[in-house]
């Protein structure tokens, strides 16, 4: 019918418009509280809305490639990294430097030092794919901005483990978690 497509389009626009305000009313006053941080854009969210950052955050997608983190083995309580250096050799931009400790810990090889340079990393994920221990993962971290380039964007072993404990406390990084049967 002539004009049906226009009416259909307008009805979708009107529905989104109403959903936006109805959805926001349902979230009052939680969206304006800083703790806990309110996550928006879940799959059940409808309508178009503005994120009230930093009180609200976008729920990050599991495949988002953020800065690298090192995972801790939850059973041993030490890093899953064995300091083999494969990630360093694989990195096309030479953003990783790792040295292996002389002594084993809990009968496992461990790194002595680990340096990850975000200034040059292009988040390609080659290092994550090559790691034989699944010790490396992309964190969903967003808020690591600095006013200058340089040392502030170079993470050491402790900082990477801290990032891993923050985002993958069970030693499982988001993609593996997503693949687990529910
Ligand atoms: S994500 Fe790519 S560029 Fe970044 S450290 Fe890993 S291999 Fe290198
Ligand atoms: S993160 Fe993985 S690839 Fe890199 S040194 Fe550790 S075990 Fe080897």
Image (spheres, rainbow, N blue to C red):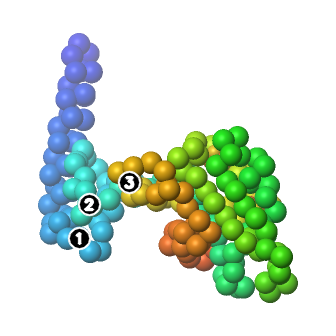
- Give residue 172's position: percent from left, percent from top: 63, 70
Distance, label 2 to label 3, CA atoms, is 17 Å
For residue 146, which numbered disc appears in the image? 3
What residue is shown with label 1?
Answer: 34
- Is there CB contact under 8 Å for labels 1 and 2? yes
Rendered residue at 79%/84% (across/down): 105
SS at mark 2 in the image: loop
Quarter of the C terminus within the rendering: bottom right
Question: Residue tagged by mark 2?
Answer: 54
Is 37 situated above or below 175? below
Report the front residue among 49 and 154.
154
How far separated are the C-alphas under marks 1 and 2?
A: 7 Å
The answer to whether one can see residue 115 in this image is: yes
Residue 173 location (% of width, % of height): 61, 65
**CA separation, marks 3 and 1?**
22 Å
Contact between marks 3 and 1 (CB within 8 A): the answer is: no
> Is residue 60 rendered to the left or right of residue 118?
left
Where does ligand 2 appear, by image quarter?
Answer: bottom right
């Amino acid at each position: 019918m002539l004009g049906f497509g226009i009416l259909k389009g307008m009805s979708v626009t009107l529905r989104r418009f109403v959903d936006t305000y109805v959805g926001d009313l349902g979230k009052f006053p939680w969206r304006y509280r800083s703790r806990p941080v309110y996550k928006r854009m879940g799959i059940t969210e409808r309508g178009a809305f503005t994120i009230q950052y930093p009180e609200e955050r976008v729920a990050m997608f599991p495949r988002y490639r953020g800065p690298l983190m090192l995972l801790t083995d939850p059973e041993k309580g030490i890093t899953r990294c064995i300091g083999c250096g494969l990630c360093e050799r694989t990195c096309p931009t030479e953003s990783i430097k790792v040295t292996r400790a002389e002594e084993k810990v809990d009968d496992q090889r461990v790194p002595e030092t680990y340096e990850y340079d975000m200034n040059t990393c292009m988040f390609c994920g080659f290092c994550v794919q090559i790691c034989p221990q699944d010790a490396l993962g992309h964190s969903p971290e967003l808020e690591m901005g600095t006013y200058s380039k340089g040392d502030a964007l170079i993470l050491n072993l402790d900082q990477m483990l801290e990032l891993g404990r923050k985002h993958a406390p069970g030693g499982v990084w988001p993609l593996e978690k997503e693949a687990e049967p529910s």
